[in-house]
Amino acid sequence: MDITNFIVTARNQALLYGDYSTYHRQLVKKLHNCRKRLNIATRNRSKFSKKDPISAEKLSENHEFLHLQLFTAERAWAHAMRFKAVHSSDTKRITGRTRSHIISRLDKAARAAEQLVVALSDTSTTGASDTDVLEARAYASMIRGATQFEKQSWEPCLRSYATARIIYIALSTSMSGDIFKDLLSDTIDPSIRFAAYQSKVPRTLAIATIARKAFPSSDSDLVAQINKLDSELLNQSESDAQKGQVGAPNAPQTITWRSREVKIEDAAIALALASTDTATARLAEKLASSDVILPKEMAAAYDEVLIASQDAADATKHAIDELKEEGVSQNDPRIQSLQITRTAVNYHMISWRIGRNRVLSGEHDGALLDSAPTTTRKSKKDASSRKPKIEPTGRKISRLKDKVVLYDSTLQSIDSIKELPGVAADEELLEQLNATAKYFQALKCLTIARSHSLTSQSLNALVLTKHAFDECEQATAFFSSHDNSSSDTSPHNIEIRQAEIQFLHELLKGEVQRCRAIVEIDNIQQKAANATSSNAKVPLIQRLFEYPSGGADLENLVVYPPKVEAIPVKPLFFDVAWNYIDYPRKAPAPTLESEQRSEQTAQSQKRGWFGFGR
């Protein structure tokens, strides 16, 4: 009969393009059409007559009566959800007639679902299987739990939701569990957690533990049906019951952050931290094995740890949000403990993310030029038999760009750590983060410098390498005075070991000297090239004062045929010429006698009118 799939599919299809009002209108039409098919619909202008409750005989005759009962229950449930959605934006809680109407609709839906359970329980008549009965029982318990939730009857609500949860988990072992997972995560588990909180159940208990304790074990028939599907589901050892961590007996009860130990009061956080510890142990084993060779395979081993760490961070944030919604102030000790836990969990998550980037960078965090990851796995025999292949420059630059992207991601992750609560006030941690950032900044500058070296830009490479060396020196000064507790065999994370920082420091020292030598050689070659180009047309006879370091050009000894050229003349020849050339001199000042003489001469020359004539 597949009751759960029928209900969940109908809800998803309606809510995908609409809301609860759309779902309610669809159910009204489906219910009317179903009654028409069963020939029990009230005719137009006819008097309404109350229908008899569904029976096992009717179900055995026609399975449409099953759909009729489900449509009836869903219509009442959708009607109630529509009213809740309309009043969800109200600042005050839903009270008065609206709340009473919602409760009455949910109660009607629960009664319809419970009638279906009673009818299906007669398996000899209806032919229903145990799975069908369990699905109907879980559906009825879930609707009844929603009714008791609105009535604020927390213990019966917890019992109903616990019944639904145990049944759905048992059914997921023999059926496809995707639909059950959605119901558990979206509806049942949050309701159990809130009802448990209202019932003063400790938050240290996991939801599975709360459900087992609230499950009605007095119902022998239901217990027997569940044990048929999963005999271990209802069994719980005393140690697990005391710890409240079902399935994770070694879950941590406290977490330490910067010499502060905080008690973990939320079971979801403890379970997530236990999963993180387990994934970390598996990561260490996998990296220590000889099977992992390629950096991509080593980075893939970090995925499980990152997922578990993200779950722990999400669980911590969810716990903080729940307390804030309940009106708990920031000064409350529970909020303070959760904030410390949140900082610690997020720090470890970002630390593993940085470790994954370091593994992808290659050996020694990508400090070596040939330490980039390869794309294929090669055995030792093949590597020894084949000659090393020269990689083209373009491929090398592309790999260097990939490294720079990883370093940028690492530096962004370090900056995100500084934004966590409480980190800004921790000066020692800030110094450590700044030194770590300088270490990766040095690696980034070294990588960019190598790309400039490959493109014959030696001066740029020298400047970047010198900057990388300065950054590394500052990081080395910090790490040399602070001992690191991590071992050399542990997986990479944000912590930098002494051997790694010393290796980079020595490498950069040699790289700086090498780049200086290359720049000097380039300068000498450039000077020689400039001299050669400028003296290429000057014959050797005019360059006898220069030493030909590259050898004399015997094809350019003199200019032939000779050209007429100006000959330099000494200033002595101009001094001798002064004795033979009459240069114009400055005229003396006129006197009285000279003026009279010039007037007499002018009068003697005048003849006739206006000086013309004989």
Image: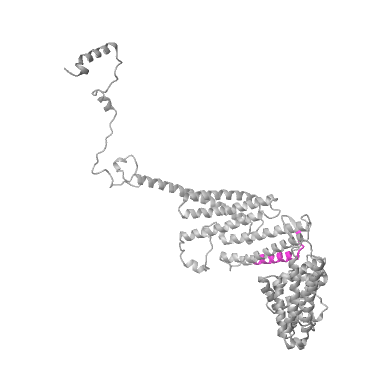
**Does any portion of residue 235 appear in the rendered image?**
no
The residue drawn where x is 58% and y is 49% is: 471
- Is 296 in front, or is 588? 588
Tell me the quadrant of the picture where the C terminus can be found.
top left
The residue drawn where x is 27% and y is 35% is: 567
Q: Quadrant of residue 492?
A: bottom right
Q: Is residue 191 left or right of residue 476?
A: right
Q: Position of residue 498 (x, y in %)?
A: 62, 54
Q: Residue furthest left?
A: 614
**Does any portion of residue 351 appear in the rendered image?**
yes
- Is 543 in front, or is 118? 118
- Is 195 in front, or is 477? 195
- Does the stretch in magenta take in 499? no
- Is 601 in front, or is 539? 601
Magenta segment's dominant SS is helix
Q: Is residue 185 left or right of residue 513?
A: right
The residue drawn where x is 49% and y is 59% is: 396
Q: Which residues are magenta?
A: 262-282
Q: Quadrant of residue 221?
A: bottom right
Q: Quadrant of residue 80?
A: bottom right
Q: Position of residue 499 (x, y in %)?
A: 60, 55
Tell me the quadrant of the picture where the N terminus can be found.
bottom right
Q: Position of residue 33 (x, y in %)?
A: 70, 81
Q: How is the image coloured?
A: one colour
Q: Position of residue 219 (x, y in %)?
A: 82, 79
- Does the stretch in magenta take in 264? yes
* Residue 336 vertical position relative to residue 383 in the rendered view, above or below: above
* Residue 368 vertical position relative to residue 108 in the rendered view, above or below: above
